Amino acid sequence: MADTKTQAVTESANERVAVNGDLEFVEELLSSGAAELKFCYQCSTCTVVCPITPDESPFPRKEMVYAQFGLKEKLVSSLDSWLCIHCNDCSTHCPRGAKPADVMNVIRSMSVVHFARPAFLATAAQSPSRVWMLFLIPAIIIAAVILGLPDGSALGFLSGTVVFSRMMPVAAIDVVFLPAVAFAVVTALLSILGFLRSLRVEYPRTGGGESLSTAIMGTVLDVLSHRKFLECTTNKSRAGAHALVMYGFIGLVITTTAVGILYYMNRFGMDTEVSPYGFFHPVKVLGNVSGTLVFLGCAAMLARRMASGKSGKATVFDWTFLWVFFLTVITGFASQVFRVFDLAVPAYGIYYVHLVLVFFLLAYVPYTKMGHILFRAVAMVYARWSGRAIVRPVIRDGLPPKRDVQAEPQPQ
Ligand code: SF4
Ligand code: SF4
């Protein structure tokens, strides 16, 4: 390992500190979306402007130091990178264009890979050249199940009225998706337990922490109210788009659960209606309203990311999740429309794509940005419980003016 390590020695009046850094890790950071990291000259403006950093050991300047030295272990186990909400205030005020918000974002995606079990799935999910493999797996499984069914082998479902359960009966959905969900639950637990173990070592509980129940309640209220997003200045409008996606997602989870419960109640002899529901059935209304919220939120986020640098730089981690979620909703709506007009080929074709995308979202939760729901929630609860979440008042006067670093030549 000697050739991949660098050793920096700093001296003060009475002490000498040796730092072992991982040069390969620094290269990985630079090539993963944090290329401007090298411009940082440690002025600490970013930490001063951050609206949510705690008093003790504030961020993100210290993460910039760790990143420049290649202190991988400190960064991938970082609690603070998950407290950061990528508001971009720090990058807006950074006098060197070092983009600390993007560095924090890259650290989060590396943290996901570090704790993922098996790690190669997380690596594939974040690799532009390999992410297609994760789509190929459900594409093959679902096609094999459809073609293995009596009506599927000869594509017999294409004739007659469009009914999706003729192509993919509920029993076949269960065979494909229940193991996928079980896999996601087990692997997510392994990831989160690893993360928690590391937090217990790096951030021991102090006397000022909340009880676990108070910490959980406080986190739930913070998430539902988007309170921390509203403390941003650069990227304040992102709060609305994020809230649309979050509430839409919650609505879709409730819809899917309701569809499953009604189906099995019917199977066990109760007089409940089963899918496909009428347009004004409460489950249908909830599903369509929730899908519309996700559609609008994803569209707003994608538009912002493509149109301006205000949202910060997006990685494969960000783009894949946003596009998959967006396309899942679009294919869900489109397959409904083609079913209503009884157009078999586009209806079944789009429904097949929809199933592949849903599988991707569910099965790979710990490896994609979907996992940020888990990591961030755990980090927020842990920060409150451990006493890490004490935030000082923000001092914004006397700061350097905001700069449009996108439009300026980069420092050398
Ligand atoms: S404001 Fe920019 S240059 Fe100053 S410490 Fe933060 S990242 Fe480095
Ligand atoms: S992106 Fe926002 S929350 Fe994250 S470190 Fe920068 S100022 Fe703080």
Image (cartoon, grey):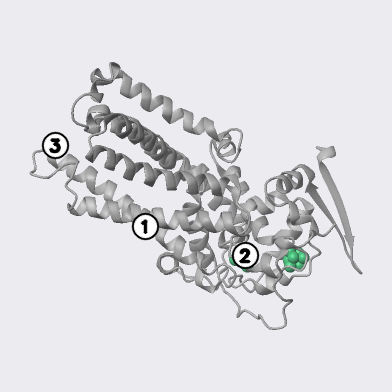
Indicate which label's residue lies in the foreground, 1 or 2. 1
User: Splitting the image into four quadrants, where does ligand 1 fall?
Assistant: bottom right
Q: Tell me the residue at 34%/52% (across/down).
A: 291
* Front one among 258 and 152: 152
Which image quadrant is residue 164 in?
A: top left
Q: Is residue 154 above or below residue 123?
A: above
Reading the chain from its start, which is encountered first: label 1 or label 2?
Answer: 2
Which image quadrant is residue 9 in?
A: bottom right
* Front one among 171 and 275: 275
Q: Secondary structure at mark 3?
A: helix
Residue 318 drawn at (x, y percent): 55, 49
* Front one among 262 and 332: 332
Indicate which label's residue lies in the foreground, 1 or 3. 1
Asked if residue 182 can be seen in this view, the reply is no
Q: Is residue 265 above or below residue 44?
A: above
Identity, as a three-letter code, of the amino acid under mark 3: Arg
Residue 281 drawn at (x, y percent): 17, 52
Reading the chain from its start, which is encountered first: label 2 or label 3?
Answer: 2
Q: Secondary structure at mark 2?
A: loop
Crowdedness of circle 2 by 10 Å Cα count: few (<14), some, many (20+)? Answer: many
Write down the residue under mark 1.
293
Residue 18 drawn at (x, y percent): 85, 54
Residue 139 drawn at (x, y percent): 42, 28
Write down the residue under mark 2.
88
